[in-house]
Structures are given as C-alpha cells and as structure tokens.
Amino acid sequence: MMEALCQKCTSTFIIDDADREFYKSMDVPEPTFCPQCRLQRRMTHINTRNLYPRALTPGATPVISMYSQDKQLNIVKDEDWHNPNHYDFFSFGKPYDFGLPFFSQFHDLWRTVPLPHLQRAYSSLENSEYCNAVADLKNCYLMINADFNESCSYGFSVEESKFCMDFSFSNKCELCYEVVNLRNCYHCLFSDNCENCNGLIWCQDCMGCTDCFGCIGLRHKSYHLFNQPLTKEEYEREIQKRTLSSWTSQQAVRDECQKFFLTQPRKCMHGNSNESVEGDYIYESRDVKESFMVKKAEHCKYAHFIDHTTNTTNYGYDYTMFGVGADHIYECSWCGLGVNNLKFCVWNYGAADLEYCTGCHYSKNLFGCIGLQHKQYCILNKQYTQDEYEELLPQIKQQMMSIPYVDAQEIEYRYGEFFPSELSPFDYNQTLAREFCPLTKEEAIAQSFRWHETRERPPLDSVHPDDLPDDVSDVKDEYLSKPILCKAYEDDPMKALQHHCTQYFKIIPQELEFYRSKGLALPRYCHNTRHFHRLQHINPFRLWSRVCDKCGKDIRTTYAPDSREIVYCEECYMKEVY
C-alpha cells in the first residue's frame, strides 16, 4: 500500500496491493489523479440529459440534440450516422504523428468526424422522439438513460417500467410518480428506496409492503401510517385527511413526513444481497469497493451507475455508467453490452480491446478511433494490417509517455490518463459532472472548466405558479396550451439556471390525464427542476467515517457525521426492522 499525490487537487490517495494487481492485469500505469478527480473527469464527457435545438446544416429546421449549437462539431442525424453506407469514417483518418501529443491528434479527429445528434437506438423507438440514451421505448417523452419502458415521461436511469412519471434510478415499476430508487413497485407515490411494494405514499426503505403512508424501514407490512398499524378502515379515513390533489395540502403532507423520517433510524448503506461491498446503493454484488449505484457486479472498484437486472459486470475500475455483461474495464464512461478489455473509452457497445475510442460499436483492436463500427486494427480511423497495428501500438504508447499533452492547468496527460476535460465536447454544466460533482460557475471557471451560459428566455404570456388552481379537479384543458412559470425561477432565477431550469414549462396531454386519474396536484416546477429535486434524495457519492448511533461501532457511510439522520450499522438496523 502506498500514498500517491493527485495531479489535479493535490490531495493524497491510496493505491493498495489489490489495485496494483488490477493495473498490472490491464497493463496500464498507476493513476495520477485521485478517485474523485477521476470520476469528475469521466463525467465531464457524459451528457445525456441536456438537450438543445440545433440546426444540422445552415438554414435547416433545428432538431433536438445533445450538442448545443455553439459547439463546432460535425453533428448529423443519428439515423444517417448508424447507416453503414452513409459515411466513410476512414476518410477522416490520418497517420499517427509522432511529433504531436496523442490527445491533440484525437481532438482534431473529433472535430471533423460525424457525430450523431443523439445517442439512442432510434430504430427500437416507437412514438418516443424526444428521448436520449435510450432503447426499446414506446409512447415515452423526455426519458433519459432508459430502456424497455412504455408510456412513461420524465424518467432518468430507469428500465422495464410502464405508466410512470417523474422517476429516477428505478426498475420494473408501474403507475409510480415522483419516486427514486424503486424496484418492482406498483402505484407508489413520493417514495424512495423501496422494493416489491404496492400503494405506498411518501415512504422510504420499505420492502414487501402495501398501503402504507409516511413510513420508513418497514418489512412486509400493510395499512401503516407513520409506522403505526391501523385497520383498513382506519387507514382509509386517515388517507382522506391528507389529500394529494391539492398543492397546498401536498406540501404540508411532505413536511409532515420528512419531519417524521428524521426520528427514525437509517441503515448505513442502501442495498441488499451483497457480499464484501463498500459504497452505497449496491445490490446483488460481491467484492465491490467504493462504488455507488451498482447492481450485479463483482470485483469492481470506483464504479458508478453499473446497473442491470440479468448480466453481471466483472473487474471494472473507474467505470461510470452502463455495464450489462462488461468484463475488464478501466477508466471508461458509458460503455457496455458485453464489452471486454476497454480502457479510456466513451460510448462503445459490444466491443473488445479498445483504447481511447468513442462510438466504435462491435469493433475490436482499435486505438484512438471514432465512429468505426464492426472494424478492427485501426488507429486514428486509419486501417492497418494486424502486424502493422501490433507493431505501431507500443510505439505510440511510448511516445505518449515522452510527449505528454499539457492542459491549461499545466497538468500532464500521458498514456494511462483518461481524456482531458478541456477536450470534452461539452461544458461542465452540460454534463453529468454538474449533477454528481457539483460546482458553481465561479468554482468551475477557477478550475479551468468551461461553463455554458444559459440565456434567460424572454418573458412569455405565462401562468404564474401561484395562479394555478390549487386542486387538480379545478384544472381545465386550457392549461395544456399555456406556458407556466417555473416556481424555482420565480424564487431565485440565478440559482434555478444553475440546474438548467427551463424557466417556463407546459403540461402535456398524457401528463394532465395522469394527474387527474391519480388525484395529484399540478406541479409548480419544470421537469429539469423536478429532476434536480429528486437528485437531492440520493446521498453523495462519498464515504465518511462515523459511529453507529445504536451500538457505537465504527462505520463507513454516505451520511456525513454532521447530518441530522439517525444512522445504524447494518446489524443494529436489521434488528430494528425485523
């Protein structure tokens, strides 16, 4: 075990013997960035949620794109990009220049090669045009990082769900609303971290429960109100007192529930069916360390958003987003679907033996390539024979060690470093980093990150949030045609724009039908602000040392030592709930 000094933040971090074994097995140098700076760097290359109108050719009608109009890139329709006969990606290739840093050459290639306006399996979508990072959707709207969903809207990182709205990090749910981290749940509202439940309202960490309101930490219970058992008749009478069809009543109920939750213990980590894991939101995994939002993974460390219901991910370090049968992955973002032996890559499916590649689906033995599908033995989009490729590759890696890329902060990038953030096609606040490694504009610029200026929209003839009908029963169809001023923007415009508040929003027809059928008040916030609010329900991706509030045992947890929650170690918590 040894201490290393982070090039970026100058903090020390530990490289232990198991880490060294992994780096040796992947044939990569030891990292020079700390785990948090490595995560931040990878996330600056991921944008799936922030969509912009962009004209793909001068004078053309704009389409919705993940690349804002100011980015000087060759953006094309994704249908054309996926068509193997539409573009000759080899025509953009160049021989490797041993006099220039690799990252400079890759960046030049990036600025010329066609890139799809969205990253989605467009041919598997039915009536689901305004979605990104998705596959197999039907009748969906503004779904992001979502697969196999039907009739859903405003979802992020969700799978196999139907008739849900405003939900995040959830799988196999139906008729759920404003929920976070639910699995196999039906008709649950305003609830977090629940599994195999039905009819929950404002509940947390419940499993196998039905018809519960304002409850936390229950197992296989029914008709409970604030963790107290009631008869069915008593429960229904109490529920009637707490109407959700009124916005005023809904906010009062929320405050009542949150106050109660602070009186009840929490487990030090979210997860179950694990063996030898450390982190949070980990499920059905083994030998996983310092990882978050992970399901079905083994032998992983510093992994995030690796979640799938069937295929296990194995041996992944510094791996952010996707999984699905991935094996031996290092420093990659948004790669998965049976990928194997990938290093320093972004957005590759079904590929093997890639380094520094993006959009090279179902390819193998590539280095520094973009958009090559079903190809092999290429460097910077130039084709080589197998013998030529195997001769050049070690020479390029050696050249990367002797001629590093140097960024604006004078940080050196040799072989073994992920892509520099300053070469990302996205600005800091356009990426996943803004949500999970949050910085203010001033902090980001001070660290040499770019910042996308969100322009305030001109005033519209809109409905003020205070003028919306308090009860959904009083909402007329005419509200479908009226823009509504987002309450977050009304309260604090500068703060709202930090999380990409849209300033105004509209209620779509299927949305109004959902609110009416479920007896739910109209929201006062735009969909981006609602997403931002749900993210606040997720604990930070950071571990602190503290003691169990029951037995005093030392624990590692994502609840900070000064947080208001009562936190138990797993043993004490299990005794409490069972």
Image (cartoon, grey):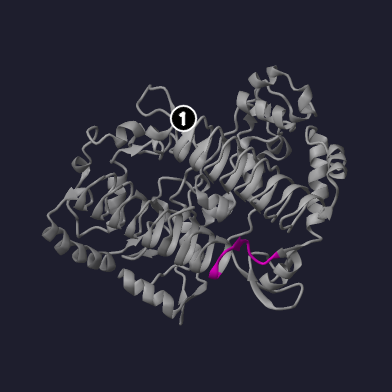
Q: Residue 81, located in which quarter of the rendered image?
A: top left
The one of 210 and 16 positioned closer to us in this rendering: 210
Q: Which residues are magenta?
A: 267-277
Q: Residue 90, located in which quarter of the rendered image?
A: top left
Residue in the picture at 65% in, 21% down = 480
Q: Quadrant of the C terminus?
A: bottom right
Instruction: Please indicate whether residue 544 sits to the left or right of residue 363 in the image.
Output: right
Vertical arrangement, residue 342 with respect to residue 529, above or below:
below
The one of 447 and 94 positioned closer to us in this rendering: 94
Q: Judge whether residue 188 can be spotted in this image.
A: yes
Q: Judge whether residue 9 can be spotted in this image.
A: no
Number of numbered discs on residues = 1
The one of 238 and 65 positioned closer to us in this rendering: 238
The residue at the far top in this view is 478
Vertical arrangement, residue 84 with respect to residue 193, above or below:
above
The residue at the far bottom in this view is 1
Q: Callout 1, which amino acid?
A: Glu
Q: Check if residue 460 falls in the magenta segment.
A: no
Residue in the picture at 69% in, 56% down = 205
Residue 537 locus on image (x, y percent) = 66, 52
| Mark 1 residue element | loop
The one of 60 and 180 positioned closer to us in this rendering: 180
Residue 550 locus on image (x, y percent) = 77, 73
Q: Which residue is mark 1?
A: 129
Residue 110 locus on image (x, y percent) = 31, 45
Instruction: Please indicate whether residue 349 sits to the left or right of residue 203 in the image.
Output: left
| Label 1 CA crowd tier, 10 Å (few <14, some 14–19, many 20+) | some
